[in-house]
Image (cartoon, rainbow, N blue to C red):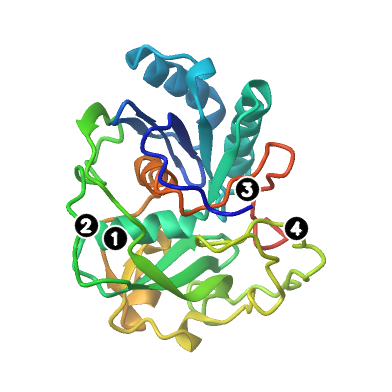
Amino acid sequence: MTPNPSLNAATILAIETCTSACSVALWANNTLSFQLIDTPRGHSQALIPMIEALLAEAQLTVNDLDYVAISQGPGAFTGIRIGAGVAKGIAYGQNIPIIPICSLSILAQAVFTDTAAEHVSVMLDARMGEIYAAQFKRRTAAINTHIDTHINGNFDTNRNSAATEITPDFIITTPAQVCRLDAGTNGDTPNHETPTDESLAGKEGLAGKSVTRISENTVSGNTISEKTISGHTIAGTALLEYAEVIAANGGIPCSIIYPHAKDLVLLAKTGRYPTVSAAEFSPVYLRNNVTY
């Protein structure tokens, strides 16, 4: 369960379904291809045809894949399960490893590659007046040149590109956790049971760490006002729902809203993330309750 050497020569399929944006990416023959569509409640219909289209365009089949990279969560409950099911099915069928990477890390890397931000807070809308949040800081002063723009407004990106080399360029300063909004802002703060260590035992480590257990201390239930986000660049879907709350606490919004499979595959091919078998892989939800 240790990171592999650089996987530049490998063929990697990446799947990202943690939000309403459904994306897939393929790294093969030193070329990156990808598709992204915004399809709320349509992931189950869109995902497999998107994968088939990428493989056909590259004149490959699932038999040619060496790894499947998956955005393991946190995020939308149904979307995570759809992506995980497809990834596990391919990995089982081809007897190949899965590379799980936290959805919040994928977004963080996108911000660090596309902007000059030094401190980033990633916030995904978790519904029920809560967000999934993690904080990162830039590892180096260098800014990588990204392949192209993350948000093109159409959500129909499908093109090939010679890929710029990328390495994880962040340090985790606050692990992934559930964060509540302030009571009385956009509705009262919901009151539900914090996930226990036992309920989360065996889940993959988040944000590029080695495989670890996510403990009760990691899921702290802090409110936004208790977190230091003043001066942080904010990315993620929480910007669509809670922009006023974030701005009131000093967060600086950016245009990167959705995690994208092309960032996932580029992180996966660095070899810095542990692989697991299809049988070992479990999605990360961060909490037991997904709705009231």
Query: Which element type, helix, strand or loop, lies under badge 4?
Result: loop
Viewer-proximal residue, 213 or 135?
213
Residue type, mark 2 in image: Asp
Query: Which element type, helix, strand or loop, lies under badge 2?
Result: helix
Q: Which residue is drawn at 63% across and 79% down?
A: 220
The residue wearing badge 4 is 202
Residue 242 in view (yes/no) = no
The residue wearing badge 2 is 114
**How far is the residue under mark 4 from the one under mark 2?**
34 Å
Residue type, mark 3 in image: Phe
Q: Which residue is drawn at 24% across and 26% down?
A: 159
Quadrant location of residue 6? top left
* Residue 139 pos. (x, y %): 32, 72
The residue wearing badge 3 is 77
Residue situated furthest right in the rendering = 198
Q: Do the residues labelled 1 and 2 touch (CB within 8 Å)?
A: yes
Q: In which quarter of the image is the C terminus?
A: bottom right
Answer with mark 4 or mark 3, whichever residue precedes in sequence: 3
**How far is the residue under mark 3 from the one under mark 2?**
28 Å
Q: Do the residues labelled 3 and 2 touch (CB within 8 Å)?
A: no
The residue wearing badge 1 is 111
* Residue 63 pos. (x, y %): 53, 16
Residue type, mark 4 in image: Gly
**Closer to the camera: disc 3 or disc 1?**
1
Left or right side of 267 for 101? right
**How far is the residue under mark 3 from the one under mark 1?**
24 Å
